[in-house]
Every structure is written in structure tokens, then in C-alpha cells.
């Protein structure tokens, strides 16, 4: 039985330059898909997978993330006296318990590998999950939970992957696929942001990982890779010489909310999915002529 994964790391130090001016004074992780911040989706997914310790690697101007995962007594009190008990209990449900969160800072923007390395003292000598909060998934059960099932069977390191259009491989980390089913196949190699001609497949690393603590020593030795940054994928490509890496092509799909197109699409899809909002939103889009025939018919009043 592999050692249980109790801790998850959330790198949230990025500057969010692709979303300026929205991110000038607000962390990009607080941008909302419908009414929940991106970071809340990642934390919810981790809790669903059994995570008990939430480690945030933050940076300057990210204090509001820490506030988001704290009680807000004035607000709670106001909701209580106004009798808004449902909103109050929803807010309380979103919070990790006292003592379950830890925060550290990445002092310089040296890349994802460096951000993960900054969590080493808080994680310690144990396996951990890593969730990139830009990547929001529509998946049931959640992607990390699906990966935990593979981890419990295989141990080692687990990487969530999804197919990408071959022309877009150079935006992501790409894995080489060995034998085994979609629910757990052997990864034989990884490369960060390859040119389409050099990509070993079209399976991209979509921002969910379960990693063994030996990655930290490799990250500390890592020199700068693609884009002049310390790359996590490069350290994994070294670790794979001595440890197993299993790919999970999960059920579900990702929305890359670090891009405007992915973010906008996620907002529409998640809003249409919501039982409290979907029917009216579908109707409103239909009235604007923005849905195709099938969707528009669904939006007609019964
Ligand atoms: C990072 C990883 C890359 C992964 C991607 C998913 O890249 O280095 O392997 O595919 O996240 O979002 P970044 O988005 O930081 O350039």
C-alpha cells in the first residue's frame, strides 16, 4: 500500500500578465468562473480527493487568497442577522478546517519548478499532490480523485493527461505513452513545450500531479529550461530514471483558464451546468440568437 497523500501544493505566485488590467491589483487565482474563484475549484477538488493539508506558494499582492480561506466574521454575522442561512453555510463549507492551510512565498518568478521547490519544508518527506489552479476541470469524480485511484494501485508518481490538438503541443508538457490502459499507463518520457515535430504524443500534462518527495532534491539542482525558467517537467524527466511515472487519461476535460478563451468558455459551460442558473442563462443566450438549433430548442419555455 503506497504512503497516503495528505498534502496538496497550489502554486499561486504567477503575475497573471495575460489578464491585465483585471490582475493589476487582484491575483488571477481570484478570477471567477461563474461565482467561485479559480483557486476554490482547485481546493474543492483536492478536498474531494482526501487532502488534509493545503500548501499555497504565493507571492507579493496575493494576501487576498489567504483571506479567502479564512473566516470573515463581519460578513458571517451580517448574513446571520439577515437570516441568509443557506449562503452562510455555503461559505463555511468552502473553508478548509483551522490549521489545514499553510502559506509560503516564492520570492522571485523563476518558474513552476522553483515554485514547487519553495514548498519543500512544508511538504516534508512525503508524497504530495500538485494542482495548478489555472486549470479548471469538468469531471466527475474530480480529476485528482481519479488519479488517487491509480496511485493507490501503482504508487510512484502520477500525472494527469488529456489529448490536445497536435498544433498546440508547444504550449504544454507532453508525455510519451508506454503500455497500459487510460486509467493508468506507463509514461516513458516527458518534454516541456516541444515543437510539434518533436512531440512524443499529443497527450499533455494538464496541471494535476502526485509526486514523490525526491523531486525536491532534483529541483534544487535543476538549471533553467524552456522559457529560461526552472521547469518541473525537466526534473520529472530526471526522476523517471529511478521511479515509476504513471499517466492517467482521466474522464473529463480541462479548461485552461490562464487563457482568455479557456476562461470565457469555462464561464459559459459551468453557468449552463448550474441547476440554479443554467435554464435561465440558456434562455437568455437563446433570445440573443447565440445558441445553435438544438440548444435554442432546449431554451424555449416549456
Ligand atoms: C505548466 C507546465 C506544463 C503543463 C502546464 C499546464 O506550464 O510546465 O508542463 O502542461 O503547466 O497548464 P505553464 O502553463 O506554467 O507554462
Image (tube, helix red, strand yellow):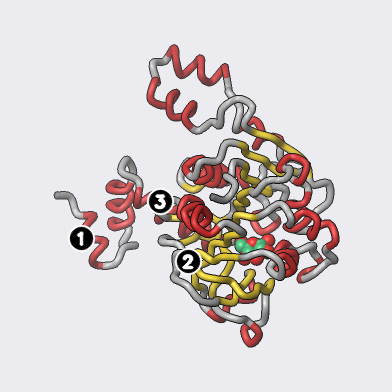
Residue 114 found in image quarter: bottom right
Measured Cα–Cα span from mark 3 to mark 1: 30 Å
Identify the mark at residue 249; answer none if there is no mark. 2
The reply, left or right, for residue 110 in relation to residue 261 is right
The reply, left or right, for residue 289 in relation to residue 78 is left
Say which label, 2 or 3, has the lower sequence index: 3
Could you tell me residue 82's position as x and y percent? 42, 15
Farthest-out residue, front: 1
- Callout 2: 10 Å neighbours few (<14), some, many (20+)? many
Q: Quadrant of ligand 1?
A: bottom right
Measured Cα–Cα span from mark 2 to mark 1: 34 Å
Identify the mark at residue 297; answer none if there is no mark. 1
Q: Is mark 2 within 8 Å of ligand 1?
A: no
Callout 3 secondary element: loop
Q: Is mark 3 within 8 Å of ligand 1?
A: no
Could you tell me residue 98's position as x and y percent? 60, 25
Viewer-side residue, 183 vs 172: 183
Tell me if residue 27 comes above or below residue 187 in the rendering. above
Say which label, 2 or 1, has the lower sequence index: 2
Between circles 3 and 1, the one closer to the viewer is 3
Q: What is the number of callouts on the image?
A: 3
Name the residue at 46% across, 55% down: 146
Callout 1 secondary element: helix
Residue placed under numbered mark 3 in the picture: 141
Amino acid at each position: 500500500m503506497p504512503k497516503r497523500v495528505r498534502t496538496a501544493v497550489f502554486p499561486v505566485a504567477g503575475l497573471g500578465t495575460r489578464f491585465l488590467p483585471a490582475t493589476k491589483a487582484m491575483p488571477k487565482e481570484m478570477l471567477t468562473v461563474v461565482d467561485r474563484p479559480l483557486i476554490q475549484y482547485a481546493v474543492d477538488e483536492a478536498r474531494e480527493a482526501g487532502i488534509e493539508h493545503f500548501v499555497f506558494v504565493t507571492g507579493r499582492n496575493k494576501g487576498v487568497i489567504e483571506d479567502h480561506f479564512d473566516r470573515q466574521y463581519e460578513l458571517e454575522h451580517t448574513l446571520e442577522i439577515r437570516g441568509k442561512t443557506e449562503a452562510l453555510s455555503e461559505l463555511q463549507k468552502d473553508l478548509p478546517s483551522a490549521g489545514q492551510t499553510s502559506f509560503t512565498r516564492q520570492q522571485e518568478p523563476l518558474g513552476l519548478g522553483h515554485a514547487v521547490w519553495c514548498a519543500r519544508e512544508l511538504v516534508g518527506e512525503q508524497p504530495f499532490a500538485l494542482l495548478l489552479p489555472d486549470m479548471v476541470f469538468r469531471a466527475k469524480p474530480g480529476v485528482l480523485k481519479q488519479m488517487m485511484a491509480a496511485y493507490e494501485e501503482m504508487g510512484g508518481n502520477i500525472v494527469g493527461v488529456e489529448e490536445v490538438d497536435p498544433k498546440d503541443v508547444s504550449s504544454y508538457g507532453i508525455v510519451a505513452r508506454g503500455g497500459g490502459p487510460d486509467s493508468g499507463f506507463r509514461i516513458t518520457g516527458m518534454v516541456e513545450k516541444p515543437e510539434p515535430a518533436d512531440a512524443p504524443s499529443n497527450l499533455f500534462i494538464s496541471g494535476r500531479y502526485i509526486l514523490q518527495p525526491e523531486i525536491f532534491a532534483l529541483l534544487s539542482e535543476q538549471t533553467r529550461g524552456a522559457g529560461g525558467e526552472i521547469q518541473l517537467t525537466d526534473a520529472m524527466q530526471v526522476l523517471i530514471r529511478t521511479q515509476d511515472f504513471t499517466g492517467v487519461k482521466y474522464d473529463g476535460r480541462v479548461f485552461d483558464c490562464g487563457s482568455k478563451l479557456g476562461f470565457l468558455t469555462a464561464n459559459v459551460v459551468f453557468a449552463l451546468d448550474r441547476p440554479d442558473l443554467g435554464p435561465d442563462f440558456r434562455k437568455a443566450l437563446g433570445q440573443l440568437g447565440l445558441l445553435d438549433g438544438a440548444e435554442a430548442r432546449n431554451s424555449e419555455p416549456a
